[in-house]
Image: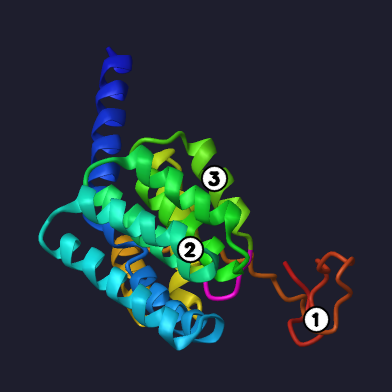
Amino acid sequence: MSDIFQEIDEDLRRDRLMQIWRRYGTAIVALGIGLVVGVGAFIGWRNYTESRLDSQAVAMADAARLLGEGKHAEAAAAFTALANEAGGAYGDLAMLDAAAATLDAGDIAGAVVLYDRVATGTKDDSLRALARLLAVQALMDSAPVADLDSRLDAIGERAGFVPATKELRAYVRLKAGAVDAARGLLAEVVDDATAPARLKNRAKEVLDALGGRLAIEAPAAETPAAEGASPDQPPSDQPSESEGPRP
């Protein structure tokens, strides 16, 4: 009978953890959108002539319009065509947009293929880390824990991505049922001075939902030795002179 109750308790615990993931998981790397825009503007103006940028900007706007109209598959095809034509870092950015549109169309596997294409083909370290991060987010509900961990390990300690990587790894630990490990990682994100405010606030909210920070055991207090006595010498049973003889 005890085994039945244990199975029920584990099922309820697993359901609670997955509810937390569904609530917060989709917003984990929303900062990637801003990063893509910022990196795209910089790399584009640095590496391409103004005339070429104008034509590619028109193609990018047309693909974005399709996306805004809810034509995700068509938008993905337009972004992919632009990526193949432009090549280089600008093409990598278009491929990231193609992956996002493919994901919006409900094709997780297709989106991950495009994210992996950027991760393995780009020469820009920031775009490589971003592509890997977005792939993990897309795979969170379907890929094995070992695969997700491997993808996060590949990101390494890339500057600017450490807090987001730790937050994603915390969700991977939740998926594996390692709640305490997840709480520890989320606490590190909350304490990270380099983490964006929104990311830190989200990590704190999830951490609180999981029961807060892990308790830290305080070291045992040392009993001070009696004044004037050697630490190795037991207290004397003889009375002091002021006490007089004991009965």
Q: Magenta span: helix, strand or loop, mainly?
A: loop
Under circle 1, the secondary element is: loop
Looking at the image, which is closer to me, 211 or 1?
Answer: 211
Which mark's residue is nearer the viewer, 2 or 1?
2
Residue 118, horizontal then vertical, whole percent:
51, 56
Can you identify the residue that label 1 sits on?
A: 240
Residue 21, horizontal then vertical, whole percent:
29, 49
Quarter where residue 54 is shown: bottom left
Q: Answer yes or no: is residue 182 visible.
A: no
Mark 3 burial class by Cα count in 10 Å: few <14, some 14-19, many 20+? some
Can you identify the residue that label 3 sits on?
A: 149
Label 1 – label 3 distance at C-alpha? 69 Å
Residue drawn where x is 54% and y is 86% of the image: 46
The quarter in which the C terminus is drawn is bottom right
Relative to 224, say whether 166 is above or below: above
Label 3 – label 2 distance at C-alpha? 24 Å
Under circle 2, the secondary element is: helix
> Does the segment drawn in magenta span residue 73?
no
Q: Earlier in the sequence, mark 3 or mark 2?
A: 2
Residue drawn where x is 45% and y is 57% of the image: 84
Three-letter residue code for mark 3? Asp
Outermost residue toward the left in this view: 69
Label 2 – label 1 distance at C-alpha? 87 Å
Q: Earlier in the sequence, mark 2 or mark 1?
A: 2
Outermost residue toward the top in this view: 1
